[in-house]
Image: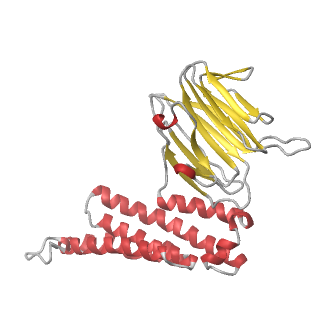
Amino acid sequence: MLLAGVVMKLGAYGCLRVAMTLFPAGLNDWSLHVMGLHSWRDVFALLAVIGIVYGAMVALVQKDFKFVIGYSSVSHMGFVMLGLMTLTTIGLSGAVLQMFSHGIIAGLLFGVVGRMVYDRAHTRELAELHAMNLGKLLPFASITFTIACVDSMGHSGVVHAGEFQRMCAVPGARHSETNASRSDWAHVFQVRLHRSEPALEPGREQRRFSAGDRRGGLCIIASPDARRGSLRLDQDTRMYSALLDPGQHIVHELAAERAAWLHLVQGEVTLGDLVLTSGDGAGVTTERAVSLTAREDSEILMFDVAGPERPGSRPLPCSTDRHDEHHRPDQD
């Protein structure tokens, strides 16, 4: 924990504050070029790239959780050295920022593995930890490690129009979103599915389904077996999307013991005797097919789910949330 968080940074800090300051001429070009290398700056930059690739590749084949983080730290320090060797303001600033942020994150990661996971599981072998379902047994440790990993990778994402994202999180985890555009409105639609066992590991998956794929019929977006390139779910649920022109009619047959939930993202459709408008939803639990007709340009989402148990019934295993976000140009 101390080694990765502090000691590994001392060499890079010494290079920046001592070697590069007291001996700036040491990075000047040589009079002779050796194998395409013009100076010690090129040599150290090459070693930094080797360290980045080597550390990352070795980390991927480790079986000990601690070694995964350790070799990953070696790879991260390669980025620090590469930034220093640019000898530019941006490169040096980035190297210092990476030293500071990685020192904190590496200490957190080693703390989670040593003080939270190992003290309770008494092992660091990834195969054994995987079988223990730590996301359920140690939710706080899982959340902390996930946050640390996401921050260490600099992970962020933008969901564009026509893209769908599946996120599987441990209980208690939260996420937030904001409009990436400073001028246009963003329509955000979220669906929450009840978890099933065995659950997928925490993570996210994002894919784009074009308007052509969804035009005029149901396009499968998510399913338990990821069929036809759909997102993978750990629930017995299949999610479909469709873009319909006025007058278009679609029918989706339901297997035995199956039900459906229909949500109208925008437009207007008829479902039996019902007329649904933008934002409306309807459940289908007794009919053996979902049959609807668009009355205007419409976008729908449909969920084919396990039907309510008999006798009695229970809510369909999903909930929805929609909201609009707008970022005005005068906002910071």
Tell me what residue is drawn at x 44 percent, y 77 percent: 58
Towards the viewer: 205 or 76? 205
Tell me what residue is drawn at x 62 percent, y 79 percent: 124
- Asked which quadrant contains residue 275, the reply is top right
Towards the viewer: 267 or 92? 267
Horizontal arrangement in the rendering, residue 209 relative to residue 237 (left or right): left
Horizontal arrangement in the rendering, residue 255 relative to residue 65 (left or right): right
In percent of width and height, residue 253 lies at 69, 37
Tell me the quadrant of the picture where the N terminus can be found: bottom right
Tell me what residue is drawn at x 36 percent, y 66 percent: 79
**Model colouring:** secondary structure
In percent of width and height, residue 192 lies at 68, 44
In percent of width and height, residue 269 lies at 64, 22
Tell me what residue is drawn at x 66 percent, y 26 percent: 292
Q: Is residue 278 among the parts visible in the rendering?
A: no
Is residue 2 placed above or below 85 in the rendered structure? below
Towards the viewer: 138 or 4? 138
Towards the viewer: 241 or 3? 241
Horizontal arrangement in the rendering, residue 8 relative to residue 39 (left or right): right
Is residue 165 placed above or below 275 in the rendered structure? below
Is residue 266 placed above or below 237 in the rendered structure? above
Q: Is residue 42 among the parts visible in the rendering?
A: yes
